[in-house]
Image (cartoon, rainbow, N blue to C red):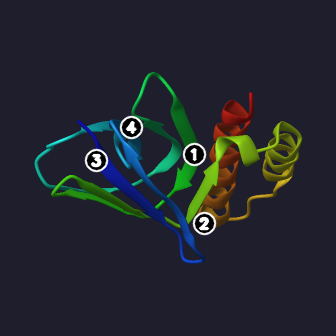
Amino acid sequence: MAFNVVIVTPEQQVLDETVTQAILPAHDGEIGILTDRAPLLVKLGQGRMQLALPGGGKRRVLYVEGGVAQMKDNKLTVLTQIAIPAEEISAETAGAELAEATAQRTTDEKSFEDRQRRMQRARSMQALAR
């Protein structure tokens, strides 16, 4: 059995595809979704989103950051700030982003939290680029 996944960012619709399973980075850990799941609304964190395609073992992997996901009537709708397919992530770019974030000076709690978020994002992207 399969269900439909739609991923939308403020700029564009990134994906509209049929899948058999989705694993999302919720704000408090990963959550798996299968066909005929009870309705769900979850706040997203940042990290890897995996989609299992029908027909034997192929997977689509994306980096997502923030937003919400809703599963209802076998349709998963993901509204997120950022959704980047793993094949479009460069290890060199992610490494440069990590170096830049690491070098960022922190002067208060807000700048410290921003630095931590940027470092986590760069590390997640590095892991996907491998």
Q: Residue beneath label 1, please?
A: 62
Q: How far across and down, in percent of the image, does residue 77 sit?
A: 34, 61
The residue positioned 44% from the left and 35% from the top of the image is 53
Q: Would you say residue 30 is visible in this rendering?
A: no
- Given the image, on which type of amino acid does mark 3 rest? Phe
Q: Dots 3 and 4: beta carbons under 8 Å?
A: no
Dot 3, crowdedness within 10 Å: few (<14), some or many (≥20)? many
The span from disc 2 to disc 4 (Cα, nearest Å) is 30 Å
Residue at image location 21% in from the left, 40% down from the top: 35
- Depth check, mark 3 against mark 4: the one in front is 3
Residue 19 locus on image (x, y percent) = 37, 42
- The mark total stands at 4
Q: Which residue is mark 2?
A: 110
- For the point 40% across and 54% down, which residue is it? 44
Mark 1–mark 4 distance (CA, rounded to whole Å): 10 Å
Q: Secondary structure at mark 3?
A: strand
